[in-house]
Amino acid sequence: MLKTALILSLGIVLSACAHESSSPTPAAPPTTAPDQWVGRWIGVEGLNLTLSKDAAAGPGHYLLKMQYGLDAEQSGTYKGQATADGIAFNRQDGSQLLRAGDGQATGLKWLADKHNCLIVKPGEGYCRD
């Protein structure tokens, strides 16, 4: 009787282990997407973004040269780092995240029909034709 219980217990444990190992492992987010974003992006009313790799800092690091507002002080070059959701960076108005989207996601009617865009926040986006 004890032997039967032990065998059943072992079977249950092995079954649970087999179940865990057969469950799919979530895929890691693509890390190359930001590399595809390198280049110039155009916003509205003269706003723009030029994204380049930061070779000195290594893979996954970027430089964001941007004019993000109409005032002269709303521009600069910022260091960014790739994350699972986009490129994280800091500027005078705080921590930001650059992520892919479409013109509708920018919240700007002038970009609404675009399909290849990068968005910082509603009202701030940059697109390519």
Image: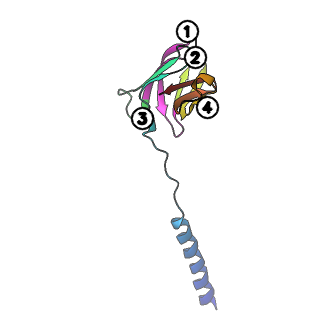
Alpha carbon separation for disc pair 1 and 4: 27 Å
- Which type of secondary structure does the marked residue at label 3 adopt? helix
| Residue 114 image offset from top left, x and y in percent | 54, 30
The residue furthest front is: 113
Alpha carbon separation for disc pair 1 and 3: 28 Å
Asked whether disc 3 touches disc 4, contact meaning CB atoms under 8 Å apart, the reply is: no
Nearest to viewer (mark 1 / mark 4): 4
73 or 112: nearer the viewer: 112
Tag 3 or tag 2, which sits nearer the N-term?
Answer: 3
| Residue 110 image offset from top left, x and y in percent | 59, 22
- Which type of secondary structure does the marked residue at label 4 adopt? helix
| Residue 85 image offset from top left, x and y in percent | 54, 38
80 or 36: nearer the viewer: 36
Asked whether disc 2 touches disc 1, contact meaning CB atoms under 8 Å apart, the reply is: yes
Magenta stretch bounds: 62-87
Nearest to viewer (mark 4 / mark 2): 4
Alpha carbon separation for disc pair 2 and 1: 9 Å
| Residue 20 image offset from top left, x and y in percent | 55, 66
Q: Which amino acid type is marked by label 3?
A: Gln
The residue singled out by tag 2 in the image is 92
Q: Which mark is residue 73?
A: 1
Q: Is residue 95 above or below residue 67?
A: below
The residue singled out by tag 4 in the image is 104
Q: Which amino acid type is marked by label 4?
A: Gln
The residue furthest left is: 55
Alpha carbon separation for disc pair 4 and 2: 26 Å
Tag 1 or tag 2, which sits nearer the N-term?
Answer: 1
Q: Which amino acid type is marked by label 1?
A: Glu
Q: Which mark is residue 36?
A: 3
Q: Residue at the location (54% across, 23% down)?
A: 90
